[in-house]
Image (cartoon, helix red, strand yellow):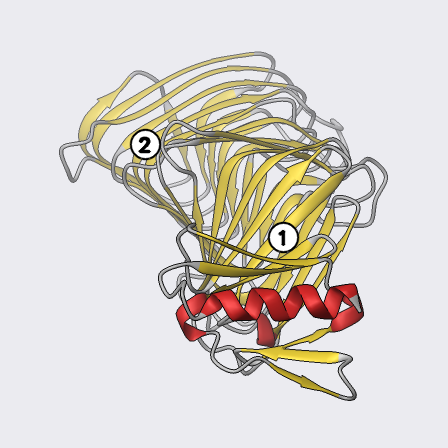
Amino acid sequence: MKKTIFLLAIFGLVGHLSAQTLKVHCGQVTTTIPAVQAGDMAYSDGGTVLTIMNNVFAVNAIDSITVDRSEYKASEVRVNYAGSTAHVTVSGDVAPHMAITASAADVSVVADALLQSEVVYELTGTSADGSFFMEGEYKATLVLNNLTLTNQRGAAVDIQNGKRIKVQLPDGTTTALVDGAGGTHKACFFVNGHPEFCGGGALVLTGNTKHAFSSDEYTLIEPGFGSITVNKAVGDGLNIEQYFRMQGGSISIKGVQGDGIDVKVTNDPLDEENGNIFIEAGSIDLTVSADDVKGIKCDNAMTITGGSITALVSGLGTKGISTGTDLIISQTGTTPTLVSMDVTGTTYMPGDALLESKCRGIKVKGNFTFDGGTIDISATGAKTKAISVDGSYTYISGSINCAVDANM
């Protein structure tokens, strides 16, 4: 009875608060509605159900309804992590199409197929045992705004929607994600879809089960991007399918037991630029020390037209750059092209016809064309080479300080 009287009192105020926001609080989830659009708020099912702007609430699940002068933002989900809990705020225009679950600091948002408009998901705050899961069928924006999130049991952030995901790191912010050890998940930060990174902030990743970051479609780093730092990965630092294109920003990878950046072909051979890498600007700094791994690896071709790659490469059979087919290094724009490596190591599994792998700065399984920029590689160790090419080597221009061992 008290709850009903309180709700009726709130409804009586709404008509006078057209520029304000009505908020319906249900446990860890708050739904926001512009007061001017609240319209008729109807009871049904004997007063047990309340409907506001197409949002249906069980009355016994409502903790309170408040009205304030905060700005209403449409098509938005905000998650604020605070220790052992998380609070979700969802705008009323998209809430009817979402199943939102918040348990302690684990948050799941599943959008239905009827939601065919872009939603902005903003994550902020800190939790030492929490997670974020999102599933949908339309492109979305994910804002990582000074988020510090560790999941003790699985992925810290798991995006499952197969569409374009704009990953925005606001300028001046730092987001750190850590996953749990011994899980079955693929990465600390996983995107089923094609992520496009933007914004000037910083992202720090720790992969305790497998990869630090993984996407099953292309990954794009946009011009003006901030930084990605991988401090540890049991598998790869960045594990990407289809293709990887870097147009700015910086990537630093160390402490990985797999490859630094690994780009694989997808199951569909007709996918655009399948298995390719394009580095056009920005900087990549690699420390690769595990045996028989690669700093940057692709199943198909790699094209470097600007930016810098610096690498410390050690370990048995380890390689700084490895391509499945051709490699092109050139200078096409105003951003200088630099490939600089210090390579030390010997042979992995010597004498084994199947597993033997020799240490290389650059290993090209197809043809290598060098047309501008600077290549500076120091290679030491038994049978170690700076650059090894299975196909032909074509020099057009540029500065190179090392020998190129090519078959043709």
**Residue 26 picture location, percent across and down:** 71, 60
Residue extending farthest left: 334
- Residue 369 visible here: no
- Residue 20 visible here: yes
Q: Is residue 163 left or right of residue 234?
A: left
Q: Residues within 10 Å of mark 1 (few under 14, many from 20)?
A: many
The quadrant of the rendering that contains the C terminus is top left
Q: Is residue 157 left or right of residue 172?
A: right
Q: Which mark is residue 176?
A: none
Q: 291 above or below 34? A: above
Q: 140 above or below 380? A: below
Question: Who is closer to the viewer here, 31 or 402?
Answer: 31
Question: Who is closer to the viewer here, 157 or 253?
Answer: 157
Q: Residues within 10 Å of mark 2 (few under 14, many from 20)?
A: many
**Residue 325 picture location, percent across and down:** 45, 51
The quadrant of the rendering that contains the N terminus is bottom right
Name the kind of residue labelled 2 in the image.
Answer: Gly
Asked which secondary structure carries label 2, the reply is strand
Q: CA distance from mark 2 to mark 1?
A: 35 Å
Question: Who is closer to the viewer here, 226 or 42?
Answer: 42
Q: Sequence order check: which comes first, mark 2 or mark 1?
A: 1
Q: Quadrant of residue 256?
A: top right
Asked which secondary structure carries label 1, the reply is strand
**Residue 264 picture location, percent across and down:** 56, 53
Residue extending farthest bottom: 45
Q: Which mark is residue 88?
A: 1
Identify the residue shown where x is 49% and y is 22%: 385
Q: Which mark is residue 282?
A: 2
Q: 314 above or below 326? A: above
Pointers 2 and 1 in contact (CB under 8 A)?
no
**Residue 347 picture location, percent across and down:** 67, 23
